[in-house]
Image: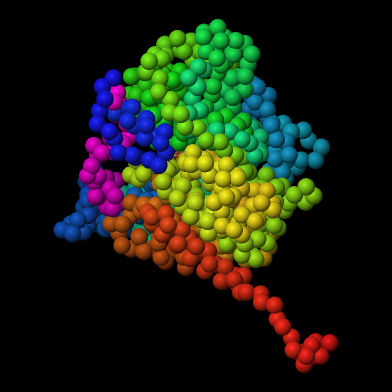
Amino acid sequence: MSTSTPRPPVSRDPAINEMVQIAADAAVPTVWDRYKAQHPQCKFGTQGVCCRLCHMGPCRITPKAKLGICGADADTIAARNLLREIAAGTAAHSDHGRTLVNTLKLVAHGKGGKYRIADSFRLREAAGLFGIDTAERDDLAIAGELADFFMAQFAWSEEANATLKLAPAKRQELWKKLGIEPRGVDSSVVEILHRTHMGVDHDYRHLIMGGLKCSLADGWVGSAIATVVSDILFGTPKPIRSKVNLGVLAADQVNIIVHGHEPTLSEMLAVAAHDEELVAYARSKGAAGINVAGICCTANEVLMRHGLPIAGNFLQQELAILTGAVEMMIIDVQCVMPSLAQVARCFHTKLVSTSEIAASVDAEQITFDVAEGYEHAVRLIRAAIDNFAHRDSGRVNIPQHAMELVAGFSNETIFHMLGGRFRSTFRPLNDAIIDGRIRGVCGIIGCSNPKVMADDGHVRLAEELIKRNVLVLETGCAAIACAKAGLLVPEAAIAKAGETLREVCEAVGIPPILHMGSCVDNSRILLAATNVLLEGGLGEDLSDLPVAGAAPEWMSEKAVAIGHYFVASGIYVVLGHPLYVEGSENVTKLLCEEMEGITGGRFEWEPDPVLAADKILAHIEKKRDALRINVKKERKLFDMKERRELQ
Ligand code: BF8
Ligand code: SF4
């Protein structure tokens, strides 16, 4: 191995920096090298004013050419491009949801192999919510009807999507008034592709409202369904301890990484890894055991329910293979870099793709069949064990960084924890917000991105917010970033929290930063906000709440969709870097200013975590003022005359 010049840090995480150096020494390019090679990045792309929606183009808007060949201006082009991102993000989350609904249906009809209804209570609760009869019916009958009901949410219907009724009544009314209630997930995505086709919808305002409508089909329909069906099939998460970062890979064990978003196969891998026969087989091949760890949101799913360790977030997928200690990486869908095959070629790692819609060059493709889920898992683990012999121990470099964490905070769990032993309720949280011990709540979500110092935006914003007594809810790669920095160790986070937040956390037994799951579980954040609202005392609509959302390092189209459904739900969202719309002043102004008068939510871009925290706090205090909960309730001292009058 040659030694290259020292690489400057690309992350606040030492495990990343060490591995980037090892990659450079081994002359294996990573995402940071390719990012550099792409410089300077195309201005037309970042400004959102490049259009290739028809073959008269491509067109670019410049000071000299203010219109595309068809006459589309910067507003139309930027809005259309943004809408297509929202549609892609919605499609990704929702198609994942649909796959889970299909599994639920197979289980209901006895074709689910070893998959079971893991949470009967959650099944019955969900069915009840949507008017499905649960009395004196067995779980499978209810599951079958619920699966059909959920499946019907994807197709076009004359009615608005039924799951929208999970939102507060006032919000539903507003969506209706604005004409942005989706009427089917698939049809919402199709509608976007239609209206952004050359020569259809040209008014940027009309387009953006259409984008919000599609995003609602993500947050309140497709993603919400994905979360609830995962809970029904695999169990509703409860607080669970585990470990995170590349140091969870074990030098003496067979390491298998699950990477992507769909937890179905990983669930079985988590179970099969404990199979005594397989463990014995691993030992017979000289390994001390079988170690299954995750990357990205598949990792979050199996962490939340099985406590499986997390090897890293999005930017660590190549680095995991570069440790030389991974026998197999099992990939499904979303956020899987095509470069994995290029890196795996330099090592013994076997790549296996398990989704019929996601092939990777050089990866073995298996056709995953739910009924055979467990058998697939066993076969894959055996193949990984067989691959252990091919590991070159001279090339094993596992950075010795692994951090403890606690995850598993579903709404149901928070509800029970806050209520204590006797009564499940959000009341203590509402009271703490009303009396100001907790100023408000912020969701920090989204990806990591080579454009910024990896993990730094997430960690610094989270630290800054808890210091200022804001409760933080996290999902996705943001949660993994904070976990690596030790912020999901409850005691450590409590020590970093502001005085009054600390008091509340200690009193009710929740940490100040709650890991709520994968990115589809952002639907849990929406429901947490709805629960707080329903508990009372903090207004009538989501836009009344002292809450905000932030995505400091986002990169994916899914994050674009999430940002929009938060804004459409009345929530203020701070992004670490802008959407690709700045080539249109009008679209930017609509999203970042005027939207507040329409949905009550709006976007803001702010790369600096401290300034982002300032802005989030300013928003929270503005909402608190409007709720009149910032009015100091001073003790009134009565004089004698007043006392007499009182009597
Ligand atoms: O869905 S946060 S990089 S892994 S897109 Fe992807 Fe972004 Fe990570 Fe989870 Ni979400
Ligand atoms: Fe150019 Fe209009 Fe075609 Fe877009 S749709 S490529 S702006 S001519």
The residue at 30%/59% (across/down) is 584
Front residue of 529/638: it is: 638
Relative side of 559 to 197, left or right: right
Q: Is residue 612 magenta?
A: no
Query: Which residues, given as a range, are shown in magenta?
Result: 25-53
Residue 449 location (% of width, % of height): 37, 42
In this view, which residue lies farthest toward the left? Answer: 64
Residue 646 location (% of width, % of height): 80, 87
Relative side of 397 to 510, left or right: left
Front residue of 317/220: it is: 317
In this view, which residue lies farthest toward the top? Answer: 284
Total of numbered circles in the picture? 0
Task: For the C terminus, give its image quadrant.
Answer: bottom right
Front residue of 604/503: it is: 503
Front residue of 627/249: it is: 249
The residue at 75%/49% (across/down) is 420
Colour logic: rainbow
Residue 111 found in image quarter:
top right
Residue 81 location (% of width, % of height): 34, 49
The residue at 45%/62% (across/down) is 614
Q: Is residue 639 visible in the rendered structure shown here?
A: yes
In this view, which residue lies farthest toward the front? Answer: 495
In this view, which residue lies farthest toward the right? Answer: 647
Task: For the N terminus, give its image quadrant.
Answer: top left
Q: Is residue 98 visible in the rendered structure shown here?
A: no
Residue 318 location (% of width, % of height): 38, 29
Q: Is residue 52 magenta?
A: yes
The residue at 63%/16% (across/down) is 275
